[in-house]
Amino acid sequence: MTGSRITAAAAAMLLAAEAPAQTLPATADQVFSRWSSPGGPGCAVGVAQEGRPVLTRAYGSADLEHRAPNRPDTVFEAGSVSKQFTAAAVLLLAQEGRLSLGDDVRRHVPELPDYGRTITIDHLLSHTSGLREWSALVAAAGWPRMTRVHDDEDALDAIFRQRALNHGPGDEYSYTNSGYVLLALIVRRVSGMSLADYTGMRLFIPLGMTATRWRDDFRRIEPGRAIAYQRAEGGGGWEQAMPFEELYGPGGLLTTVGDLLIWNEVLASGRLGAAVGERMEEQARLTDGRAIAYARGVSVGSFRGTREVSHSGSTAGYRAWLGRFPAERLSIAVLCNAAQADASGLAYTLAGRLLDDAAPGPAAAAVDAGDLSGRAGLYVNQRTGRPLRLELREGRLRVADGPELRA
């Protein structure tokens, strides 16, 4: 029964890909209509079905000063979508026997304090280490991100100064970029190469991801890159919101939707080997045995009744989402250069339309807008102390300047 359903869904998807050329582009144009004005920033979107790209399209402007439009091959920054590439580098080193995911992090980074319990490399990959978020630490010291140039040494210094954890290693899930700062350092120390050089040699060049590289020097001119923007105070027009950091690994990947579709197909086809592809999607378990959605650089969940492997991203004014639905052989990449663009929401809207055609899932539960209004406000994580502001816009509850909340 299950096999026939998947086969029927895949057939329907393939037929959709072979339908008149205007069908899929018209759907994408409708989904991204808010970001199609040449007078503002926008997005690029890529869709692959059955392992082959069937759509790459772009909307809005890449550079408002020079009136340059976004193109399908425009380069954007991918935010935390980047984490899966750092994770892949670590998994490749493990596959080569040069490290083990069960290694004590202090074996490779002895500068990390001894917290009385072992933090493993796998804890870093799955955000279960308990390490405090480096950006929250520098913000508490008076220098939030984007107020000064931070580099990896700044982040590492903040991490190494902490004498306690937010929770015991493996006891809870707590998303933190600090773990991926340490992973980038471990790749450098184990391979003898920077993360940029190692991933270029082992991933980007051999896989044909010719437009992909890391923002390891924010001053470097990057041909074809979209400038990132945010709404100016008061809502009047746009202003630049570019990342100026000398730090990458948790984020900082420069790429295109076409290259991200290549990457998704590489993972789907197992081209990097089971020790990379399968282990990347293996959901982590806490010390009490509970499975969590986060795996190694990606999250694993369900959307419209079908399995989803994805990750979102946000850095300065860039927004990103990359995901795939393995059973349906559907892959979607969205990259935007506007802080107010909900890349995740756009991707899910497009995915919902495609999946509804192929294999209808349960309808989303309706929630009265009045019920949501009482949820808007400022929240504080009791464990980490980090604030989170939720606001109601257009009848939807969203993270302030971030994505829409979804069930």
Image (spheres, rainbow, N blue to C red):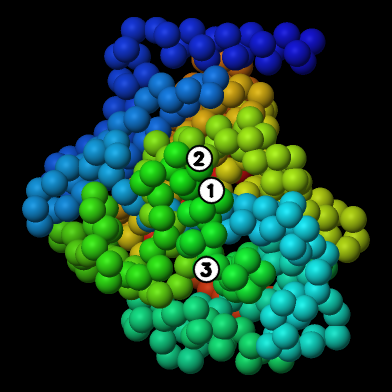
Residue assigned mark 3:
194
Q: Residues within 10 Å of mark 2 (few under 14, many from 20)?
A: some
Q: Tell me the SS state at disc 1.
A: helix
Distance Cα–Cα, label 3 vs label 1: 13 Å
Name the quadrant of the C terminus.
Answer: top right
Q: Is residue 380 left or right of residue 35?
A: right
Name the quadrant of the N terminus.
Answer: top right
Check the image and report above or below for 359 versus 248: above
Residue farthest to the left?
Answer: 66
Residue assigned mark 1:
203
Disc nearer the start of the sequence (3/2): 3
Q: Amino acid at mark 2?
A: Leu
Q: Are marks 1 and 2 in contact (CB under 8 Å)?
A: yes
Q: Give residue 17's position: percent from left, percent from top.
A: 44, 14
Q: Nearer the viewer, residue 330 or 406?
A: 330
Q: Nearer the viewer, residue 288 or 205?
A: 205
Q: Amino acid at mark 1?
A: Leu
Q: Which mark is residue 207?
A: 2
Q: Give residue 176's position: percent from left, percent from top.
A: 61, 69
Distance Cα–Cα, label 3 vs label 2: 19 Å
Q: Amino acid at mark 3?
A: Ser
Residue found 81% across the figure and 69% down from its top:
103
